[in-house]
Image (tube, grey):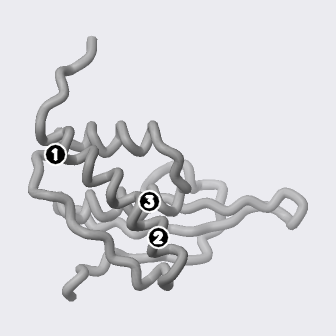
Amino acid sequence: MLRQLDIPTARAALWTWQSLRDARRRLQNERLEDIRLPAPPPLPTHAVRGVAAVLDRTSNTCLERSLVVQRWLAAHGEAPDVLVGVVGPASRFKAHAWIDGEPEGDEFEVLMRVPWVEANG
């Protein structure tokens, strides 16, 4: 059964789409450690459905996705690090970015940890 789209979920979806676009642009011009995405509007936690919907239905990299999720979580009282890691020899090299605590990063050796830093802090 599909839930009816509510305004907070729609606003979260719009923020996510704009933040993905912003992250993509900033990754081309800024150091990863210096990227600060705008805060989402004050929304209830259930609006995360809008975040997930956009992340699942748009073309985005794992790093863009991780930065957006990190910003959403920070606005809702969590402050996870974004991890960047690699695995494999040169012939089977893979790189990946994920939020600290997500199990999908278990096979990767962490090369970089990007902690949450408040934009004005």
The residue lying at 21 percent from left, 20 percent from top is 3
Task: Give the camera-side residue of 89 and 32.
Answer: 32
The residues tagged by marks 1 and 2 sit, at their Cα atoms, a distance apart of: 27 Å
Kind of residue indicated by mark 3 = Ser
The residue lying at 40 percent from left, 58 percent from top is 20
Kind of residue indicated by mark 1 = Thr
Where does residue 74 sit, x and y in percent of width and height? 24, 65
- Label 3's element? helix
The residue lying at 62 percent from left, 67 percent from top is 85
Say which mark, if any, is on residue 66: 3
Task: Give the camera-side residue of 26 and 32.
Answer: 26
Where does residue 11 sit, x and y in percent of width and height? 18, 46
The residues tagged by marks 1 and 3 sit, at their Cα atoms, a distance apart of: 18 Å
Which quarter of the rendering shows the N terminus? top left
Say which mark, if any, is on residue 12: none
Sequence order check, earlier mark of 1 and 2: 2
Kind of residue indicated by mark 2 = Arg
In terms of image quadrants, where is residue 84?
bottom right
> Is residue 27 visible to us here?
yes
Marks 3 and 2 in Cβ contact (< 8 Å) = no
Image height of 1 relative to 67, above or below:
above
How many C-alpha atoms fall within 10 Å of the one at disc 3: few (<14), some, or many (≥20)?
A: many
In terms of image quadrants, where is residue 75?
bottom left
The residue under label 2 is 25
In terms of image quadrants, where is residue 50?
top left
- Label 1's element? helix
Task: Give the camera-side residue of 89 and 67.
Answer: 67
Sequence order check, earlier mark of 3 and 2: 2
The residue under label 1 is 45
How many C-alpha atoms fall within 10 Å of the one at disc 1: few (<14), some, or many (≥20)?
A: some
Where does residue 54 sit, x and y in percent of width and height? 37, 42
Where does residue 62 sit, x and y in percent of width and height? 54, 56
